[in-house]
Image (cartoon, rainbow, N blue to C red):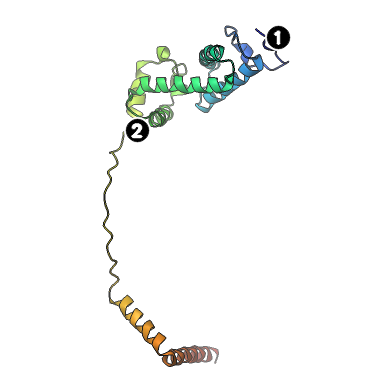
């Protein structure tokens, strides 16, 4: 381990120090502490507030990320931790819903909705991302609450048709054409309209 790895900055490993069994061989403690915080925030976003369960899941994720980092030290530990969290989460979603044929994004949506509907973090605080501690009733509840897949999208051809607005548009069009051909008539109509408006105003003001 390099000197940089062995000498972390003061106060940088507050959360990371909770994982006494996690000893990464590559990367600095600052990097792994940042990875710890990222995974912790992700768990909190899923309403996982149990400290013991948080620590167990985070240690599992960081161990997987650390093995990958040993093989390629140029990778960012935070990025690796995020990828491992997503991988473990997708595997747990599939194990709970049994929907291996669904796209990952759709499976994730269904699983998260099922978690919220059943209040899984409160009812089974040690189940999330831990198949060994996920009771059978939790899985059954999530399966029942998962969104049902809708029908497949069907592509249809729509033939454009003329819009029938009746006789009124045709009459209006003929009238406009007549006024365009006879400007004198158009002028007389405008003066008649003006005179009618003035007559109405005169009647109202008397």
| Element type where label 1 sits in the image | helix
Q: Position of residue 200 (x, y in %)?
A: 49, 89
In this rendering, position of residue 56 left or right of residue 4? left
From this view, report whether residue 92 is shown above or below residue 162: above
In this rendering, position of residue 110 left or right of residue 163? right
Q: Position of residue 61 (x, y in %)?
A: 51, 16
The N terminus - image quarter = top right
N-terminal-most mark, 1 or 2: 1
**Viewer-nearest residue: 9 or 198:** 9
Q: Residue at x 37, y 22 (%)?
A: 94
Q: Residue at x 38, y 15 (%)?
A: 135
**Viewer-nearest residue: 64 or 98:** 64
In this rendering, position of residue 156 left or right of residue 18? left
Task: Tell me how many marks there are.
Answer: 2
Residue 49 visible in the current orientation: no
Q: Which mark is residue 3?
A: 1
Q: Residue at x 31, y 34 (%)?
A: 149
**Viewer-nearest residue: 62 or 192:** 62
Number of residues whose C-alpha sits closer than 10 Å to that of mark 1, classed few (under 14), some (14–19) or many (20 or more): few
Residue 201 visible in the current orientation: yes
Which residue does the numbered mark 2 point to in the structure image? 147
Tell whether label 2 touches label 1 (CB within 8 Å).
Answer: no
From this view, report whether residue 44 is shown above or below residue 178: above
| Element type where label 2 sits in the image | loop
Q: Position of residue 146 (x, y in %)?
A: 35, 30
User: Based on the displayed image, in which of its 4 quarters is residue 31 positioned?
Assistant: top right
């Amino acid at each position: 381990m390099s000197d940089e790895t062995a000498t972390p900055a003061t106060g940088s490993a507050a959360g990371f120090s909770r994982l006494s069994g996690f000893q990464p061989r590559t990367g600095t403690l600052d990097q792994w502490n940042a990875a710890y915080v990222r995974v912790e925030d992700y768990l909190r976003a899923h309403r996982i507030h149990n400290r013991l369960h948080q620590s167990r899941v985070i240690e599992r994720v960081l161990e997987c990320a650390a093995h990958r980092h040993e093989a390629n030290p140029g990778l960012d530990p935070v990025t690796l931790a995020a990828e491992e969290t997503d991988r473990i989460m997708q595997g747990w979603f599939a194990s709970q819903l049994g929907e291996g044929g669904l796209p990952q994004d759709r499976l994730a949506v269904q699983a998260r909705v099922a978690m919220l509907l059943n209040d899984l973090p409160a009812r089974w605080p040690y189940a999330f991302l831990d198949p060994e501690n996920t009771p059978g009733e939790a899985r059954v509840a999530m399966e029942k609450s998962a969104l049902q897949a809708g029908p497949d999208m069907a592509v249809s051809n729509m033939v454009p048709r003329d819009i029938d607005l009746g006789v009124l548009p045709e009459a209006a069009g003929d009238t406009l054409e007549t006024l365009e051909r006879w400007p004198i008539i158009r002028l007389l109509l405008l003066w008649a309209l003006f005179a009618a408006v003035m007559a109405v105003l005169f009647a109202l003001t008397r």
